[in-house]
Image (cartoon, rainbow, N blue to C red):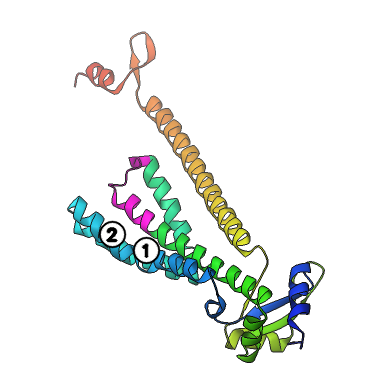
């Protein structure tokens, strides 16, 4: 639903958790002193790789490092699509570091840092954008009226657990107009989700590594026992255990 409500009632409802809203193109509603900060954060994932990585490649004398630009942009794109590619790349990188050590001069480490930069700066800019848009709409009646007049703001009710009560019309408009819910404490929520997701992948990685290590140890034990049976050679005093070289000497080879 899109209830007709005054800005004062809307602001009170947003603050006490009885009213929520869906907002389209939130960057248009980042006003005042918040705007330059949002632009700065956006430039960190859009412009910074184009400046920093060529300088680093020149410093290292290795132009293959310029591929980090594409890696950073791909990671930013995956963040926008809620992809888990960066987490998989992180698990691979940890396995690589365990085997080879961690150094920025390794391609794997360098490209992972590029991916992490693109992913995290996009997430930071996106969550700050949503938080700033929420603050602007709550604090400014003009921004609120502009959003209503442009059909970019849809007001919804919240249940007791702070979840939006969406009608079929709300869902349809959210999909067609790309409306996003403005939740409280969004920055904390997003980064806590990132941390939990990372811990989940790390737990899976180390569980897999432990399983591989146990299998490897069992394989060595089985191989050792088989070699022991093969190297059991007869002597005049009975049966004794010999190494392979000793067994060949007894056989006259």
Answer with the quarter of the image where residue 3 lies: bottom right
Q: Label 1 crowding class (10 Å Cα cut-off): few <14, some 14-19, many 20+? A: many
**Residue closest to the eye, 213 or 238:** 213
Position of 214 compared to 100: left or right? right
Q: Secondary structure at mark 2?
A: helix
Give the quarter of the figure containing the N terminus: bottom right
Residue 113, percent across and down? 38, 54
What is the CA distance from the residue labelled 1 to the residue labelled 2?
10 Å
Q: How many marks?
A: 2
Residue 54, percent across and down? 24, 60
Let me know if residue 100 is in the magenta part. yes
- Pointer 1 residue: 72
**Residue at coordinates 32% horizontally, 52% vertically from top-left?**
110
**Residue closest to the eye, 114 or 252:** 114
- Pointer 2 residue: 53
**Residue at coordinates 41% horizontally, 58% vertically from top-left?**
117
The reply to whether the C-beta atoms of the residues labelled 1 and 2 are less than 8 Å apart is: yes
Q: Which residues are magenta?
A: 99-114
């Amino acid at each position: 639903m899109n209830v007709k409500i005054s800005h004062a009632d809307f602001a009170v409802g947003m603050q006490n958790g009885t009213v929520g809203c869906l907002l389209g193109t939130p960057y248009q509603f980042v006003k005042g002193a918040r705007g330059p900060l949002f632009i700065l954060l956006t430039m960190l994932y859009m412009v910074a790789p184009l400046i920093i990585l060529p300088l680093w490649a020149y410093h290292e004398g290795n132009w293959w490092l310029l591929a980090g630009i594409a890696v950073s942009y791909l990671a930013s794109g995956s963040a926008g699509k809620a992809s888990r590619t960066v987490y998989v790349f992180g698990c691979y990188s940890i396995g690589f570091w365990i085997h080879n050590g961690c150094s920025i001069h390794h391609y794997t480490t360098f490209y992972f840092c590029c991916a992490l930069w693109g992913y995290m700066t996009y997430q930071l800019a996106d969550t700050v954008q949503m938080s700033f848009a929420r603050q602007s709409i709550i604090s400014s009646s003009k921004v609120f009226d502009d959003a209503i007049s442009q059909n970019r703001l849809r007001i919804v009710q919240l249940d007791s657990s702070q979840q939006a009560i969406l009608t079929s019309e709300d869902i349809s408009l959210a999909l067609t107009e790309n409306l996003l819910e403005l939740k409280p404490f969004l920055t904390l929520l997003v980064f806590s989700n990132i941390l939990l997701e990372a811990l989940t992948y790390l737990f899976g990685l180390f569980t897999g590594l432990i399983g591989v290590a146990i299998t490897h140890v069992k394989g060595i034990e089985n191989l050792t026992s088989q070699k022991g049976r093969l190297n059991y050679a007869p002597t005049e005093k009975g049966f004794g255990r010999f190494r392979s070289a000793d067994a060949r000497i007894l056989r006259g080879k």
